[in-house]
């Protein structure tokens, strides 16, 4: 991958803060012609520096009144088991994110559910019912925040 220059980093920082910026607004803020700015953004997409955009939803408005992080430890750590676990859980409507971890826990599963009964049923039916799961801990998410600035490396 080619090294990113200062202009690329400025573009990324602005899009990280607000991915809805129009190309015209983005170009104006970084001091480029709109065509040059669009060319840079497209190159960052092709190079997979930009891997997509996301939409943040108010889960309460959609009926997901409880969010939780479920820590999962597997008894078997071969690729087939890990891949199957991920492939089975990720499409479930309750699952927002799935993190494959190093350390004590193998996975953190970020879920949103309607109520405590839904959470209990999800944990029992989707997680602890799996033969390869040997430990589960569930923690409620009270609130979360996301940084609005691009990390500096």
Image (cartoon, helix red, strand yellow):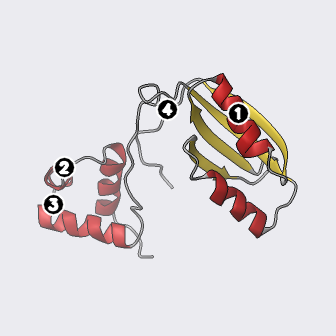
Give the Cα distance between marks 1 and 4: 27 Å
Q: Residue at x 81, y 48 (%)?
A: 73
Label whose residue precedes the other's in the sequence (1 or 2) = 2
Please determine whether, in this image, residue 89 is positioned above or below residue 120: below
Q: Residue at x 76, y 37 (%)?
A: 124
Quadrant showing the N terminus: bottom left
Badge 3: residue crowd in 10 Å (few <14, some 14–19, many ≥20): some
Q: Nearer the viewer, mark 1 or mark 2?
A: 1
Label whose residue precedes the other's in the sequence (1 or 3) = 3
Give the residue pinned by disc 4: 145
* Quadrant in which residue 62 is drawn: top left
Give the Cα distance between marks 3 and 4: 32 Å
Image spot of residue 126 (x, y percent): 71, 44
Secondary element under disc 1, as helix, strand or loop, is helix
Q: Nearer the viewer, mark 1 or mark 4?
A: 1
Secondary element under disc 4, as helix, strand or loop, is loop
Badge 1: residue crowd in 10 Å (few <14, some 14–19, many ≥20): few
Label whose residue precedes the other's in the sequence (4 or 2) = 2
Image spot of residue 81 (x, y percent): 77, 63
- Compared across the picture, whether 20 is left or right of 153 comes to left
Give the residue pinned by disc 1: 121
Res 138 seen here: yes
Q: Nearer the viewer, mark 4 or mark 2?
A: 4
Image spot of residue 38 (x, y percent): 20, 64
> Total of numbered circles in the picture?
4
Badge 4: residue crowd in 10 Å (few <14, some 14–19, many ≥20): few
Give the residue pinned by disc 3: 32
Give the residue pinned by disc 2: 29
Secondary element under disc 3, as helix, strand or loop, is loop
Give the residue at the far bottom of this rendering. 1
- Compared across the picture, whether 50 is left or right of 129 comes to left
For the residues bearing labels 1 and 2, Cβ distance under 8 angstroms: no
């Amino acid at each position: 991958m080619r090294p990113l220059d200062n202009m690329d980093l400025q573009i990324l920082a602005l899009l990280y803060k607000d991915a809805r910026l129009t190309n015209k607004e983005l170009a104006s803020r970084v001091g480029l012609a709109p065509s040059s700015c669009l060319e840079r953004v497209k190159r960052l997409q092709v190079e997979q520096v930009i891997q997509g955009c996301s939409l943040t939803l108010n889960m309460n408005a959609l009926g997901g009144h409880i969010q939780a992080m479920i820590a999962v430890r597997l008894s078997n750590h071969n690729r087939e088991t890990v891949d199957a676990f991920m492939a089975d859980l990720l499409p479930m409507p309750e699952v927002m994110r799935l993190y494959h971890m190093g350390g004590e826990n193998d996975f953190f599963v970020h879920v949103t559910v309607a109520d405590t009964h839904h959470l209990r049923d999800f944990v029992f039916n989707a997680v602890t019912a799996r033969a390869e799961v040997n430990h589960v801990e569930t923690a409620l998410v009270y609130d979360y925040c996301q940084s609005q600035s691009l990390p500096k490396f």
